[in-house]
Image: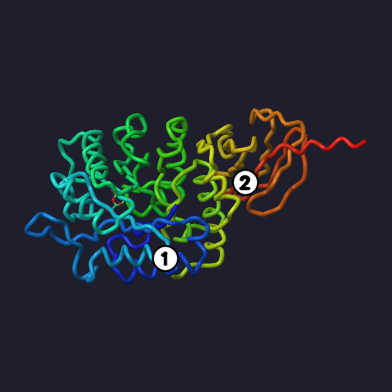
């Protein structure tokens, strides 16, 4: 869990933004809710020096990245950075191709804890090989650095990346949109399109090697109902939760969405099982995720344009507890005990997210 600069700021990154975001992670309570990684995406780069060592852009990061890392660490946060397996990053900054060991050593010397590694300008390269080269370079530094593979799902990284990286993007870029036709740029995907592409990938993910359906758009301009739905589904997918909004300036509703502890607990559940789609009736969908202690998270999703009632039976979830305690994770209320199933009214583009647990067996008195 953490934050990344791209969705909101694109290339407009600077030492000021990163320091202020570090402060905001602390003051808003996001750090204490689990958002630990502060990740600088594309465009922090300046030139390579005479020894081939990459330097940050001197205008954007006048004190260098070691100073930024020290500040981030002083707040009990971790610093992430971005590079690319090709000759140039997607923002046309220097890529790491041919400089993998030098770059990895440089990042480690600054105190970097996380590397997102992109796939622009990689003509003629093979993804598995190129990512393995950087994996080895990172390992050689001796510093633990989370390795985030970002080749947009092109070479089906779920089939090869578990020993190579800690997370891998499964799709192209998330836009600020529900569906592709509402996205601003032609290369972007709506979060519904991304959700659909996760079907069938759940078995590839697990602790230490996760599917990454891209960073969150919560707080960037979707409706509050969609923000909650997007956040709920990413939690159910056990996805990396990387906030992508301006934390210095967010509404109470955005903060409440990003810090809902019950929903975060579903994402971070120690079993690390990715949830999956249980039923698809067109506009009505049901998703579920097994949780530690025999519990289950369930999402009732309304993809349609009118409110609907969605029913779920325990049988279709493969749930056999005779009596089930149901908690509504957005109303933050226990709804009582139910025998065979339950139902809820779900707003258009919204979800109802439930946590099911077996009712405690009553103690037998004398
Ligand atoms: C894309 C990547 C985005 C962002 C961007 C930066 O390839 O998918 O998440 O990192 O490059 O230029």
Task: Say if 194 sits above or below 247 in the image.
Answer: above
Q: Check disc 1: other Cα within 10 Å, few if <14, some if 14-19, many if 20+.
A: some
Displayed quadrant of residue 68: bottom left
Displayed quadrant of residue 97: top left
Task: Say if 28 sits above or below 124 in the image.
Answer: below
Marks 1 and 2, the one that precedes in the sequence: 1
Label 1: state its secondary structure. Answer: loop
- Return the x and y of residue 206 as percentages of the image width and height: 45, 35
Asked if residue 343 lies left or right of residue 229, the reply is: right
What scheme was used to colour the molecule?
A: rainbow
Residue, x 64% and y 38% (percent of image)? 295
- Return the x and y of residue 20 as percentages of the image width and height: 38, 70
Q: Nearer the viewer, mark 1 or mark 2?
A: 1
Identify the residue under disc 1: 75
- Return the x and y of residue 172 as percentages of the image width and height: 34, 44
Identify the residue under disc 2: 353
Residue, x 18% and y 50% (percent of image)? 95
Residue, x 60% and y 38% (percent of image)? 292
Residue, x 62% and y 46% (percent of image)? 353
Q: Quadrant of the C terminus?
A: top right
- Return the x and y of residue 174 as percentages of the image width and height: 39, 49
Asked if residue 24 lies left or right of residue 265, the reply is: left
Task: Say if 94 sits above or below 155 in the image.
Answer: below
- The residue lying furthest to the right in this view is 366
Asked if residue 135 lies left or right of residue 188, the reply is: left
Foreground pick, 152 / 182: 152
Estimate the spatial distance between the alpha carbons at disc 1 and disc 2, rounded to whole Å: 33 Å
Label 2: state its secondary structure. Answer: strand
Asked if residue 241 lies left or right of residue 65, the reply is: right
Foreground pick, 200 / 69: 69
């Amino acid at each position: 869990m953490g934050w990344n600069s791209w969705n909101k700021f694109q290339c407009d990154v600077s030492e000021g933004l990163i320091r202020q975001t570090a402060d905001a992670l602390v003051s808003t309570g996001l750090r204490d809710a689990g958002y630990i990684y502060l990740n600088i995406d594309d465009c922090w780069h300046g030139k390579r020096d005479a020894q081939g060592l990459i330097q940050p852009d001197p205008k954007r990061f006048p004190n260098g990245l070691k100073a930024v890392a020290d500040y981030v660490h002083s707040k009990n946060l971790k610093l992430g950075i971005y590079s690319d397996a090709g000759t140039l990053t997607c923002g046309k900054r220097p890529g790491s191709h041919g400089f993998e060991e030098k770059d990895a050593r440089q990042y480690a010397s600054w105190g970097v804890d996380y590397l997102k590694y992109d796939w622009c300008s990689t003509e003629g390269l093979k993804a598995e090989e190129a990512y393995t080269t950087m994996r080895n370079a990172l390992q050689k530094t001796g510093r633990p650095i989370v390795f985030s593979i970002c080749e947009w799902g092109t070479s089906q990284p779920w089939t090869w990346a578990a020993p190579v990286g800690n997370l891998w993007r499964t799709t192209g870029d998330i836009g600020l949109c529900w569906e592709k036709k509402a996205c601003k740029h032609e290369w972007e995907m709506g979060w519904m399109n991304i959700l659909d592409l996760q079907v069938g990938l759940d078995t590839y993910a697990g602790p230490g090697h996760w599917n990454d359906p891209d960073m969150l758009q919560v707080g960037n301009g979707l409706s509050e109902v969609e923000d909650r739905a997007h956040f709920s589904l990413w939690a159910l997918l056990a996805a990396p939760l990387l906030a992508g909004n301006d934390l210095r300036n967010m509404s109470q509703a955005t903060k409440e969405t990003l810090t809902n502890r019950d929903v975060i607990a579903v994402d971070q559940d120690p079993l690390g099982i990715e949830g999956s789609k249980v039923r698809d009736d067109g506009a009505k969908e049901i998703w579920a995720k097994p949780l530690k202690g025999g519990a289950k998270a369930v999402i009732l999703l309304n993809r349609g344009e009118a409110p609907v009632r969605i029913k779920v039976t325990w049988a279709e979830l493969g749930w056999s507890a005779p009596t089930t305690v149901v908690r509504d994770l957005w109303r933050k209320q226990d709804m009582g005990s139910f025998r065979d199933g339950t139902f809820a009214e779900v707003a258009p583009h919204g979800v109802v997210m439930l946590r099911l647990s077996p009712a405690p067996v009553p103690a037998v008195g004398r």
